[in-house]
Amino acid sequence: MSSPRLYIILGTLALLLAACSTQYPETCPSSTPVGLMDADEIASDASLPFRFPLEQSPIDETLYYGWFGVSNQCTPDIVDCYEYPERLFQAAEDYKRPAGTPVYAMADGTISFSGPAGGYGWLILIDHPQANLYSLYGHLSPSRWRLKVGTDVERGDLIAYLGDSDENGGSKEQPLDTHLHFGIRSGQTADYPAKGEWRYMAGWIKLCPQDLGWLQPSLVITSQKIPDGGYPQPKVGFFTRWGLDILFASLFMIGGLQFIVSNRKKTRFLLLIPGFIAIVAGIVLQNRGLVRSNLLLVIGILILAIGIYYYIRRPITKLHDQS
């Protein structure tokens, strides 16, 4: 490969990575906890657009893990506090309940996602186009009954049950206290990418949730208001929202093209490029906290090792002989 082509590929990668860079805040606007002691009364009034997804309980106002918009960093008044490795902000509200507690749809809509989702256990998302919102229900039970993707639901319909501590995102070795992770966001699920801070299933994030369209769930429910045209989405640039998805797509596209060209033109050096790109992406994404595993890094190392093997052990003449 000629040097100009190599510089173009590496330069494109650098630009894509730069496009995804973000300045993370030290603090976010605080929210005022809203009591839900009228949850049953709201749920029984069919004329209202929203309802709380759980039945009323005396522990509704107990904060768990963190209230909407708060940081996971320790405050000075806490003596015994776990020090988190990075600052994150809560994009939802968490409500502690026993396993098996029924969970209901907050409003009319269509289920856009229903499936396992890592630390969420089983996760369900519901689009509510009449309000330009979608709602998120995490830590549900994968072993109990739940609704499927594409199901139309009405306000108050049963959608799933809370999971046990070893299936709700936890495990037998590290059980997770049973609770509902409940989020509301302006827009629809398809308006947001699958990766990065703008991902559609975010819980704890590095950016202020208010800036990414996340709303305080209890406030939305108690206000019972739908703005004209629905809740407005945040206005941001295309690359700001979709940059990480574009980056992943570009990495795989560049790697695939390199293999295609190398097979056709018998250019052995091209076999080294995909592994190098995957390794760089794995390191950068891990340092930014956007991926939690070493899988991409391991794949990159394996691809690079294979490329080095072919580059050293198989002369170009043999590649021609096998064509």
Image (cartoon, rainbow, N blue to C red):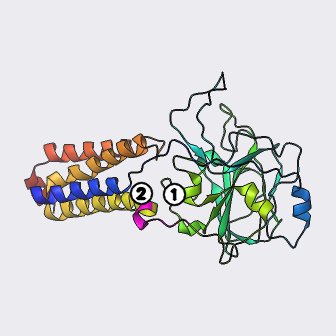
> Magenta segment range?
234-240
Front residue of this view, candidates 145 and 154: 154
**Which one is earlier in the sequence, the residue at label 1 or at label 2?**
1
Depicted 126 relative to depicted 130: above or below: above
Q: Amino acid at mark 1?
A: Trp
Query: Is 76 drawn above or below residue 7 in the view shown?
Result: above
Query: Going 70% across and 37% down the picture, which residue do you hit?
Result: 176
Mark 1 touches mark 2? (CB < 8 Å): yes
State the image coordinates of residue 76 (x, y, percent, origin top left). 62, 27
Quadrant placement of the N terminus? bottom left
Please state which amino acid type lies under the numbered disc 2: Leu
**Marking on residue 307:** none
Q: Compute the Cα span from label 1 to label 2.
A: 9 Å
Q: Position of residue 267 (x, y in %)?
A: 13, 57
Name the residue carrying label 2: 244
The residue singled out by tag 1 in the image is 198
Residue 235 in magenta? yes
Q: Residue at x 64, y 69 (%)?
A: 231
Task: Work out which residue is located at the far top of the displayed protein and give it.
Answer: 79
Q: Is residue 1 visible?
A: no
Callout 2 secondary element: helix
Given residues 265 and 277, the one toward you in this image is 277
